[in-house]
Image (cartoon, rainbow, N blue to C red):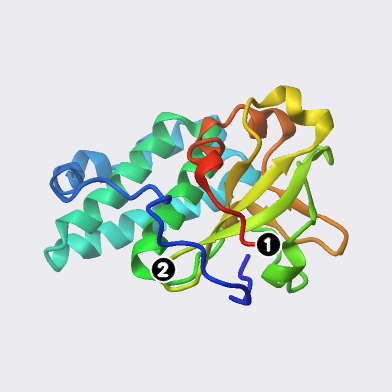
């Protein structure tokens, strides 16, 4: 989902996790880490039609990493290779891993985060319209309310902050969660927003809770 930057910048506070350190990233740029075809072909998860957007994303990451090698940028290559391997190592959380990688890179590049989801973009939603909007899972359960946005230093949205609903408070010990913007699904209903995960997968994702308490809402 692409939303226009219409609210104030609340970002460059050291709250967004950065990718691998340069030395570690460069060492991850190996032929083995970029060889994904056999693993994808043997995985029922990646063969499923509803995960084909992830297969496409992995292919694009690999092609881009190989282009990085050609121009001598082993750090960028390694960051992509590490993301690919993390997606293959734990397919159940591959969508979150990809979204996290996209937000991390966008926090450095200053460019907008682009979703790889195959769902159509739908209606346009401004950041101000997101404030106070309920967030639902793919099960149509209300997970909480969008209360803020975390931006890159250049003002691009990276994450939304979500306050869990009272009904869902038992699922998490924190008062606020952070969800990468590329996980959001825009539908035709103006009253709420969806996240591209089931209810169980959403509550079982620890990365949504990292740094959540330290982030100041933008709303």
**Residue at the image point whose x is 30% and y is 42% from the top:** 82
Mark 2 and mark 1 in contact (Cβ < 8 Å)? no
Q: Quadrant of the C terminus?
A: bottom right
Instruction: Name the one closer to the observer, 206 or 7.
Output: 7
Residue 36 in sight from this viewpoint: no
**Residue at the image point whose x is 49% and y is 70% from the top:** 112
Q: Quadrant of the N terminus?
A: bottom right
Would you place residue 44 above or below residue 76 in this image?
above
Measured as percent of width and height from the top left, residue 137 is found at 76, 41
Measured as percent of width and height from the top left, residue 88 is found at 41, 35
Within 10 Å of disc 2 (Cα), the crowding (few <14, some 14-19, many 20+) is: some
Q: In 3D space, how far apart are the residues under numbered discs 1 and 2 (Cα atoms)?
A: 17 Å
**Residue at the image point whose x is 19% and y is 55% from the top:** 75
Left or right of residue 98: residue 20 = left
Would you place residue 121 above or below residue 116 in this image?
below
**Residue at the image point whose x is 83% and y is 37% from the top:** 141
Regarding mark 1 in the picture, which secondary structure is present there? loop
Which image quarter: residue 74?
bottom left
Measured as percent of width and height from the top left, residue 164 is found at 73, 38
Where is mark 1, residue-wise? 219
Instruction: Name the one closer to the observer, 35 or 167.
Output: 167
Left or right of residue 35: residue 142 = right
Regarding mark 2 in the picture, which secondary structure is present there? loop
Where is mark 2, residue-wise? 153
Which image quarter: residue 140?
top right
């Amino acid at each position: 989902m692409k939303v226009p930057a219409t609210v104030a910048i609340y970002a460059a506070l050291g709250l967004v996790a950065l990718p691998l350190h340069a030395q570690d990233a460069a060492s991850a740029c190996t032929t083995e880490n970029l060889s994904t075809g056999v693993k994808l072909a043997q995985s029922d998860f990646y063969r499923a039609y509803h995960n084909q957007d992830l297969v496409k994303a992995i292919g694009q990451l690999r092609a881009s990493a190989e282009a990085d090698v050609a121009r001598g940028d082993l750090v960028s290559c390694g960051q992509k290779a590490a993301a690919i391997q993390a997606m293959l190592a734990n397919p159940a959380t591959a969508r979150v891993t990809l979204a996290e990688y996209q937000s991390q890179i966008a926090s450095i590049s200053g460019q907008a985060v682009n979703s790889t989801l195959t769902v159509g973009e739908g209606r346009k939603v401004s950041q101000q319209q997101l404030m106070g909007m309920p967030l639902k899972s793919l099960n149509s359960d209300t997970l909480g309310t969008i209360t803020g946005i975390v931006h890159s230093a250049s003002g691009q949205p990276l994450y939304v902050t979500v306050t869990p609903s009272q009904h869902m408070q038992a699922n998490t010990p924190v008062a606020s969660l952070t969800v990468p913007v590329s996980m959001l699904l825009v539908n035709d209903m103006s009253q709420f927003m969806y996240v591209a995960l089931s209810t169980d997968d959403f509550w079982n994702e620890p990365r949504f809770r990292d740094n959540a308490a330290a982030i100041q809402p933008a709303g």
